[in-house]
Amino acid sequence: MNTELTQQQKQHAHGMIERLAPEKLSAVVGLLEVMLDPFDRALATAEIDDEPVTEEERRDIEASREWFKHNQGTPFEQVVTELGFTMEEVTNYQDPS
């Protein structure tokens, strides 16, 4: 799909959501949550992490960024294999709960 058209559609959707009455907004949010794949749904419904970043975490983040300037990351597929799984197992995983 054309990215410009997609962006226009998203802006149009945002505009319509802004005009919704509060009681209709919860219905739309529920519909959107159902339409998302499980990973996106988990992200969308996760609690917001509002804890401040500590100085130690800032240093760790900066060290990580610096490392990636000089090193290549490990492909996800390689990590999966090294852990003894297949990509099919990861892709088709269903939470047992």
Image: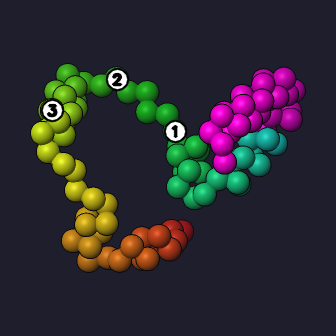
Residues in magenta, as a range: 1-26
Specify whether 28 is left or right of 2: right
Q: Is residue 22 visible?
A: no
Q: CA distance from mark 3 to mark 2?
A: 22 Å
For disc 3, the marked residue is 66
Locate residue 63, reporting x and y percent. Answer: 14, 32
Q: Which residue is mark 1?
A: 47
In front: 90, or 42? 90
Which amino acid, by three-letter code, is at mark 2?
Pro
Looking at the rendered structure, the kind of residue marked 3 is Glu
Label 1 or label 3, whichever comes before in sequence order: 1
Secondary element at tag 2 = loop
- Nearer to us of marks 1 and 3 is 3
The image quarter in which residue 81 lies: bottom left
- Location of residue 73 with respect to 55 vertically, above or below: below
Could one spot residue 26 in this view of the protein? yes
Horizontal relation, residue 24 to residue 39: left or right: right
Residues 67 and 37: in front is 67
Magenta span includes 15? yes
Q: Label 1 is placed on what type of residue?
A: Glu
Residue lying at 17% horizontally and 36% vertically, measured from the top left: 69
Q: What residue would you read off at disc 2?
A: 52
Q: Residue at x 39, y 73 (%)?
A: 87
